[in-house]
Image: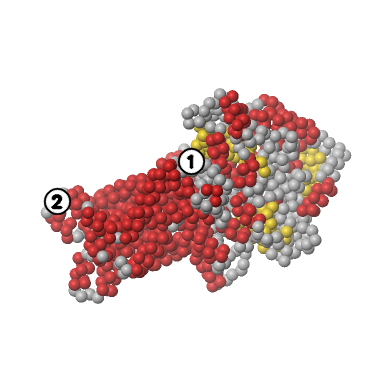
Amino acid sequence: MAFSRRGLMAAAGAPVLMRVADALAQGIQPRRGGILQTILTPEPPILQLGVNNQGPTLVAASKMFQSLLTFSPTLEPIPVLAKSWEVSGDGREYVFRLQDNVKFHDGTPMTADDVIFSIMRFHMELAPRARAIFQMIDSATAPDPLTVRLTLKQPFQPFLLMFEVTACCIVSKRLFDGQDFRTAPTVQRPVGTGPFRFVEWQRGNFVRLERFEEYWKPGQPYLDGIIYRIVPDSQSRRLAIETGQVQMTQANDIEPFDVPGLRQRPNLTVETKGWEYFSPLSWMEINHRVAPLGDPRVRRAMSMAIDRNFITNRLWFGVGKPATNPIASTTRFHDTAVKIAGHDVRTANQLLDAAGLRPNAQGIRATLKHIPLPYGEIWTRLSEYLRQSMRQIGIQLEMESVDAGSWARRIGNWEYETSVNFVYQYGDPTLGVERTYVSSNIQRVTFTNTGGYANPRVDELFLAARSAADATERQRAFTDAQKILVEEVPQIWLTELAFPTIHDKKLNNVITTGVGVHTSFDDVFLAG
Amino acid sequence: MDLTRLPGFLAARLAKAAVVILAIVVCNFLLIHAAPGDPASVIAGQSGAADERFLAQLREQFGLDRPLHVQLWIYLKGVLTLDLGFSHRQQLPVWTLIQARLPATLLLTGTAFVFAIVTGVTLGALAARRVGRWADSLITVIALTFYATPLFWIGLMLVLVFSVWLEWLPSFGMSSVGVELHGMAVVLDVAQHLLLPALTLGLFYLAVYARLTRATMLEVADQDFVKTARAKGVPEGRVLRAHVLRNAMLPVITFAGIQAGQLVGGAILVETVFAWPGIGRLAFDALLARDYAVLLGVFFCTSVMVVAFNLVTDLLYAVVDPRVEAVG
Amino acid sequence: MMDFWRRFRRNRGAVVGLCILVLVLLLSATASLLFPDSPWDMAAAPFMPPGEMGMLLGSDSLGRDVAAGIAHGARISLLVGAVSTAAALLIGVTLGAIAGYAGGIVDDALMRFTEFFQTIPSFVFAILLVAIFSPSIGSIVFAIAVVSWPPVARVVRAEVLSLRSREFVQAAEVLGKAPLAILLTDVLPNALSPIIVLSSLMVATAILTESALSFLGLGDPNLMTWGFLIGAGRSVIRIAWWMSVFPGLAIFLTVLALNLVGEGLSDALNPRLARRRA
């Protein structure tokens, strides 16, 4: 056989399982029963993954859907619907062996056909992120009903990272084939293989999931059901977890300034782990087409005017940490040795003088427009902080507030001067970092290289890292790219975001992997 | 009013109401489409990744690639057949979405409205009767206090007191989820959830009605026909009820007609604070997500309700004040 | 005039209201003297309770001085209230009076127009307008004015309508007085007290509406207003009560003062009532 046995859990192997096992509650016997009440913010429009991939959809739908793998906090693969997998020596062929006895919620068995349909048709059609990667698949075949063989056109090292539920959930071919995927009836009543099945969704009120009796792991899940309540106001959400009306909050449910108060509660646990796969990095979004932002000295000066410790400590109350370079420290290939210049207002002013940007009589060097990110209060506060920081170096930011609709359009159409943005990195710089800096991705769409940064050397390095099959080779390219980027500061990175997961201490096994609250919750239980 | 003229009057009013509603639909349609951003860009922005093809696909599917007047014509044709369109964002007919949320808002605003008008008019009348005395001052101060305090602030305070400190009432939602309830228990459960939001919404309008009733009653009380009644020796209580209050009701009724629409606005705030699953919140979320069809649908429904309500107040007008003719 | 002032003075509440209002106006006039630094400056540690670190009314989540914010905010909040109400009154009284007096087709057309604006839920409409024109002080004032004139028109029309069939108006008509003259000299002055009561309420409503818009994230991000302060303080109410209590109090007192003054005016303008009160 032409396969190196790198797959088969040998590479990812035993240490990972240990790490996951460590995270699992030990010494407490899992208990069957109980309904988990939690919160979903904001209310998702649709719960079918693929048709909608917004944050809240991912949280709730990941209980109903599963993918082949999930990932540990250090981004090693963990089997889910794939029992084991093998990667060929040339890095082009992936063979997945599926779990037996996996059933969809409608009772039909899940087979290799469903997996291939999900990858090659469903996500290829619906999800831009999946499409970009799955286009590299040359052929997808099923040698037998429980084996899937994918052959790539070229080696692509981060390929496995795509088989996480938030990127590629497995859907039932029977329910989608031959229909418009977006309007198929099942979109309103999602059917997956997960431990919980969809029961009811009263819009504006709650989503109710129930234990799936034919779930493929015997005896699991432990919970009888999960109820996601829709609570639009942040103070009501805080009250809900405080008064015990819900047992868990996640993602954006709780504003950072409420976290210290909740940490004090003896019955609650606050965790900030479980976002390693996503590793969201926030930055001050810069449009290079607007003078003087095209000048790297100006961007570096702006970066130096910002006190990132103030942002993490005073605004985010210690949830998350200051960004040090374009690749988050929890993403692969982050180089700890490469760091952006620290907070130094005096040097920043000198840099601007050197760049020929002189202050006028009022001490103003330049006036720029700024669009705060319309995703809640904390982002408004951040922009207010940025405005005051920029004042110190004579740059005046004029705020223009817009709603989410306008924000996406303005950024996407390059109709902005400065803004704030945060972007998921999906574990690997090729998947989640490259897109912001390579000139081939300068597009009129959000989350591309909207700033318009172009450096042929950076393009080359990202391309080299993309096609290299070898990790050390990739590391070299990424390190070089990081070195150039921290000098040129194409975007002014602010913080590595984390979101608090707050739950009742009776709730066990909540955060065990690098995707945190996006796991299936089949091993979560309420202790008596 | 001559009852035989009622059908004609009604028909004329209904025709006019239809014109108003049509104008509102067209105006809102144009306004909403003039807003920057479209649903496709919002979905793209929130999905964390997108490309041109994805956007083009969405726009084509939503019909956003067609000229505006064609989109308007399609929408109008739909409205005429009572088809409010389809929310591509939620993949559901707009009517289904509104239908699911409307009862909650009707319950909330209805309760708040009845509470506000009954208590408000009573307090206002009481104050007018005891004008200048301590009861008047007390009522005025109470009304002013509620009037001058921001709505959501009252809501938050009520939650703090009744949910957090006393733990008497739930702080959000419309019913307990995850527990099996039947019969009276369901009603009681909803009533418990309803109390704080309805009170919050009602207190503000209570203040408005109390002040308005008091002001107009004092006005009317000094008019000639009241004096005549007094001079004829009609007992004071009867003068107040039959002459003063009845005439003082005119501005109050006018105002009540307006409230029907405004309550929905107040409902956005209250529904936000109390996570009440109504259409106010639906409209606000739809606006932020540029879910045009839903937003237009909510506007349409509330407009119809307000028009109907105004029709009723017009009829009441004619009944209360015999001098006003219900001219077509 | 002296007579008017004497009658106004007799209403103690109104005098108190006037005093508060004068104080608020003084505060907004002297804000730059009392707090020379920008209210956006991070002058202290975040969440300092009142009295600490020289923060008279405490500091907010970025360490900004709440007292400075209130002083500077008074200007904008009052401006929003006054300008939008003036605009709304101008539209509302004109249309209402014309509709009520002219009757017939004119009344009909104007009332359809009013109905058109009234039928759209006003706060929702304001949100829509502000969202479309993007949140700024101009769009906020415009939106508030556009949505708040219909009640004025309705009330004025109702008053005019009921006054029209009164004896003294009919007498003036019989005597051949011009309609505009009758409207201005006989009808409107008699309809004034509800207009005044309503307009004092409207300035207050405008201030409250601005705060509600801010609360939903639709305030002008470059201007310090009371609405902004409450909006920012609302979500940290459990940690820093002073952030929403003091601006809330400022709104409350101003709205209260406006109402009391309105009432005093109403008494003073309507001597018959004032006599009864005495």
Task: Please tell me in which quadrant of the rendered image residue B31 appears.
Answer: top left
**Secondary structure type for disc 1:** loop
Q: CA distance from mark 1 to mark 2?
A: 60 Å
Q: Give whichever of C194, B172 is nearer the camera.
A: C194
In the picture provided, is C36 more to the left or to the right than A411? left
Q: Disc 2 marks which residue?
A: C177
Q: Disc 1 marks which residue?
A: C37
Find out whether the residues at labels 1 and 2 contact each other: C-beta distance under 8 Å: no
Q: Amino acid at mark 1?
A: Asp
Q: Residues within 10 Å of mark 1 (few under 14, many from 20)?
A: few
Q: Amino acid at mark 2?
A: Lys
**Secondary structure type for disc 2:** loop
Return the x and y of residue A85 as percentages of the image width and height.
Answer: 81, 45
Residue A423 visible in this rendered orientation of the protein: no
Q: Give whichever of C177, A165 is nearer the camera.
A: C177
Return the x and y of residue B296 as percentages of the image width and height.
Answer: 46, 49
State which chain disc 1 sits on: C
Earlier residue among tags 1 and 2: 1
Residue A428 visible in this rendered orientation of the protein: yes
In the picture provided, is A147 more to the left or to the right than C150? right
Circles 1 and 2 on the same subunit: yes
